[in-house]
Amino acid sequence: MKKIKFDNWRKYGFEFLSIFIAVVSAFALNNWNENRRDALSENKILTEISNGLEKDLSDIKLNENGHRDGISACNFFRKAFTGKNINADSLMYHYLKLTRDFVSIQNIAGYETLKSKGLELINNDSLRLQIITLYEYDYNTLRKLEEEYSEMQFQENYFKDINEELAPHFKIDSLGNVNGIDLPLKIQENKRNKLLIYLWKIQENRNFILEYYSEIEEKIDKVRKNINNEIKH
């Protein structure tokens, strides 16, 4: 009887151990598969975010160049309003650039995908925080500065007054095209001073947004570098 009981214990013990090992192995395999899927998803989303940020940098460069052109236009018309020599051939180029506004184009598809799958998909806490801060704070601030902040709406704020003083001096050909300007500009002193203040405000605000763009570029470069270090090959 003792031998039979021992044989039964050994039999059932072996079966229990086999089942236990099978369950643990299945759990471990399932866990490994989930981790692997998460890692693949993380890599894919991080790559998508990095590619989007690269496009954002290109858009930022275009806006930066546009603001610098606006500053050059301020310098051009400051000379014109104060009676200094200007190159009349570049008049309309600077005229177009002087009060031109810009929009902030941001490629957020990768970040939106990350949010839909859960921000915790990014294992690196520091990188996750950098990404969230860039999209939720820095990009929103940039968009509001360019598109909503009243000081930055140059066309709306300044074009009408500037054009009223310049338009009477434009030379118009038979086809209705501007082909020059009468110089020197004859503008009353109080109106001239008003225009010079406008130029100062435009230039200062463009310099301000350029500084913010520079900060954003540095943050984008840092995030992309950290993403490249994090992506598992």
Image: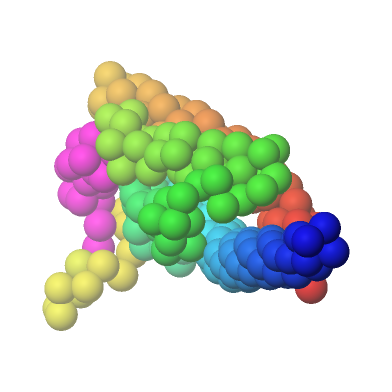
Q: Residue at x 60, y 37 (%)?
A: 129
Q: Nearer the viewer, residue 126 or 118?
A: 118
Q: How far across and down, in percent of the image, does residue 189 sit?
A: 31, 22
Image quarter (top left, top right, bottom left or bottom right) of the C terminus: bottom right
Magenta residues (range): 153-171
Vertical side of 93 occupied by 78: above or below: above
Colour mapping used in the image: rainbow
Vertical side of 136 occupied by 230: above or below: below
Vertical side of 63 occupied by 32: above or below: below
Is residue 18 among the parts visible in the rendering? yes
Q: Quadrant of residue 107?
A: bottom left
Extreme residue toward the top, this view? 190
Q: How far across and down, in percent of the image, does residue 53 sit?
A: 57, 60
Image quarter (top left, top right, bottom left or bottom right) of the N terminus: bottom right
Q: Nearer the viewer, residue 133 or 75?
A: 133
Q: Is residue 5 magenta?
A: no
Q: How far across and down, in percent of the image, does residue 232 sit?
A: 77, 67
Is residue 67 among the parts visible in the rendering? no
Q: Nearer the viewer, residue 77 or 143?
A: 143
* Left or right of 184 on screen, residue 214: right
Q: Is residue 154 magenta?
A: yes
Count of numbered circles on the image: 0
Q: Residue at x 56, y 52 (%)?
A: 121
Which is the main secondary structure of the residues drawn in magenta? helix
Extreme residue toward the bottom, this view? 175
Q: Residue at x 20, y 51 (%)?
A: 167
Q: How far across and down, in percent of the image, does residue 11 sit?
A: 75, 69
* Left or right of 124 on screen, residue 194: left
Q: Residue at x 51, y 47 (%)?
A: 119
